[in-house]
Amino acid sequence: MSEFKPFDDKLAGLIGALSPAGRRKLAAEIAKELRRSQQQRIKQQKAPDGTPYQARKRQPLRAKNGRIKRAMFQKLRTSRYMKASGRNDAAVVEFSGKVQRIAQIHQFGLKDRPNPHAQNMHYPERQLLGINTGDESLIEILLIRYVSNFQSVKPQ
């Protein structure tokens, strides 16, 4: 049984009353809000369950001078790379283009080469995308707000 089953059952009746165009509009709004919450969570360097990401590996002493100037995933969390879209039956937040591979490596903790001349390196799992209870309540609030506006506008 899915952990979202009670959530889905509660809202299925409300969603069923919407037209396909209304569902698309609602899904797009939910996707945008989810992207915003995911971006904030990534900015705080936290996984969906609230645990902090594992810190970056220390750089060798003889590496380039200077410090790492950006926080992890600073560019990855921008709207340019993190896309939100709504369809009739789904609200989708995903990474686009070439950064999708980088995000996948960090999401699942896979091996990759940082550059073509380096050896394979194991990256720790840092979940970039995921739903938590705050996101569930956000979706519920958006859905109730949308349906209540829909009901007040609908001719009787």
Image: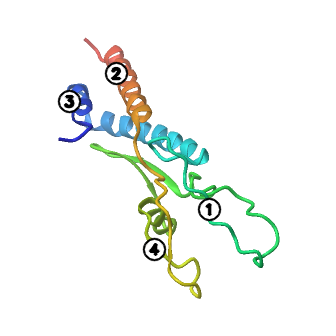
Crowd class of label 4 (few under 14; some 14 to 19; many from 20; radius 10 Å): some
Q: Position of residue 100 (x, y in %)?
A: 46, 64
Measure the alpha-carbon separation of dots 4 and 3: 39 Å
Q: Position of residue 147 (x, y in %)?
A: 33, 22
- Identity of the residue drawn at 35% across and 14% down: 152
148 and 6: which one is in front?
6
Dot 2 or dot 1: first in sequence order is 1
Indicate the amino acid at tag 4.
Lys
Q: Nearer the viewer, mark 4 or mark 3?
A: 4
For mark 1, what is the residue?
A: 56
Indicate the amino acid at tag 3.
Asp
41 and 109: which one is in front?
109
Measure the alpha-carbon separation of dots 4 and 1: 15 Å
For mark 3, what is the residue?
A: 9
Dot 3 or dot 2: first in sequence order is 3
Crowd class of label 2 (few under 14; some 14 to 19; many from 20; radius 10 Å): some
Residue 75 vertical position relative to residue 130 in the rendered view, above or below: below
Q: Position of residue 98 (x, y in %)?
A: 50, 70
* Marking on residue 111: 4
SS label for mark 1: loop
